[in-house]
Image (spheres, rainbow, N blue to C red):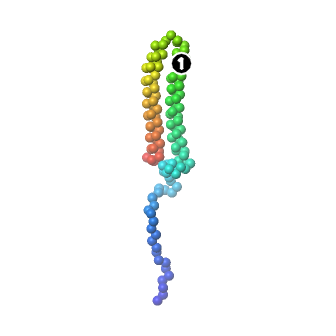
Amino acid sequence: MPQDHTERRVVVTGPPRQARRASGYYRPRTEIDEQTTLGHTYVRSLMRTQLRAALTVLAILGLLVGPLPLLFAAMPDARRLEWAVLGFGLYLPLVLLARWYVRRAERNERDFVRLVEDR
């Protein structure tokens, strides 16, 4: 009786692989997690937008508070005006500026998460 020289099929098992999208496609979150150049670019873009918001607030604050010593030096007899401006007049603009900054920073982060989560 002739022997059959065909090879036996062997079943190889291993941990299941995760399904990927089309070849070469990585989600931005993967790029960030793997610390690739593209992921670094994503993070730097968030940092740049946050820095831009912070520098805007700093510039507005400098324009708001910076000229006050010159104004007070030009009017030495107006002590009550100094106290009124420093005690009451600055609080509302500072609160509005802080509120704008927090909203802008949260919007930047929300946009970044939307980009990373690929929605």
* In this view, 35 is above or below 3: above
What kind of element bears circle 1? Answer: helix
Q: Which residue is at a point 50% across and 10% down the rendered structure image?
A: 77
Query: Which residue is found at the position 45% from the left and 44% from the top?
Result: 113
| Residue 53 place in picture, x, y as percent | 50, 33
Q: How many numbered discs?
A: 1
19 on left or right of 70: left
Residue plotted at (45% across, 65% down): 14
Q: Residues within 10 Å of mark 1 (few under 14, many from 20)?
A: few
**Residue at 52% in and 29% down:** 58
In this rendering, the answer to whether 64 lies above or below 55 is above
Percent position of residue 111, x then y: 46, 41
What amino acid is labelled 1 in the image?
A: Pro
Please determine whether, in this image, residue 87 is positioned above or below residue 40.
above
Residue closest to the far top = 77
In the picture of the structure, the residue carrying the numbered disc 1 is 69
Q: Residue furthest right?
A: 37
Question: How far from the left and from the top, in percent, is residue 95?
Answer: 43, 27
Residue 86: x and y in percent read 47, 19
Of 16 and 20, the residue lying toward us: 16
